[in-house]
Image (cartoon, rainbow, N blue to C red):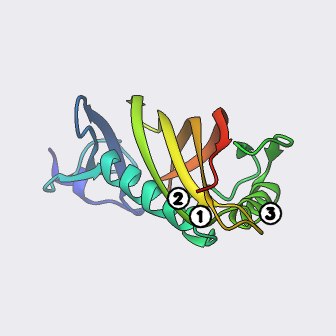
Amino acid sequence: MRNSDLNVTSTPEIVYLPCFSSGEGAKYLTEAITVNPRTSRPLPSNPVLQAISFEEVLRRVEAAQVELVSGRPEAFKGLWSHRDDVTLVGGLGGEIERGWSAVARRLDWVSTQFFEGSRAHQEVSRAVGQDVAYVVQRETIRFRLPGQKGKVTQVLRATMVFRREDGTWRIVHRHADALTMPTGTQ
């Protein structure tokens, strides 16, 4: 590298080189390097390796969905993209919602349909790419319906799609449908 490459007249640019590790506990890895904007050559620096576990993202989603089925939607809403291209096809039926304002209203409504909820899930499949990921799972929700004393169980088939936005995984689509209708009133 020549000294002239280091005499940068404009601000150096950070370039992210995507890497990916597959398998259980897959991680999205990004190596950041500083590049001279005039020559597009790397400047001498120590690369930073940043690992963000998709597994951790899914743990946060599950915890937020427990809150949702207990009547508290805010944590789950906080994991979504707030852009106009998000979509929700809910497990309680209804229209396909598109755009953050419509999805947010729907999630608020959904939270009013569940009381004293608990849930579990079984992952069926997942794929994690550079900027897009998805998970398919079977979800079992036990909850009390509004105005009823006993709890019911509902099993859903669910697919969630995630997109990286500003370095953070965000939900951009969720489609859930009933494998079983709510049953039982114990």
Q: Amino acid at mark 2?
A: Gln
Q: Which residue is mark 2?
A: 65
**For residue 26, which numbered disc appears in the image?**
none
Q: As drawn, which residue projects farthest toward the front?
A: 186
Q: CA distance from mark 1 to mark 3?
A: 13 Å
Percent across and percent down for residue 151 are 60, 59
Q: Which residue is mark 1?
A: 68
The residue under the point 27% across, 33% down is 20
Answer with the quarter of the image where residue 179 lies: top right
Q: Quadrant of the C terminus?
A: bottom right
Q: Which residue is mark 3?
A: 105
Percent across and percent down for residue 142 are 54, 54
Q: Amino acid at mark 3?
A: Arg
Q: Is residue 33 visible?
A: no
> Dots 1 and 2: beta carbons under 8 Å?
yes
- Residue 174, relative to residue 165: is it above or below? above
Judged from the image, the secondary structure of the residue bearing numbered disc 1 is helix
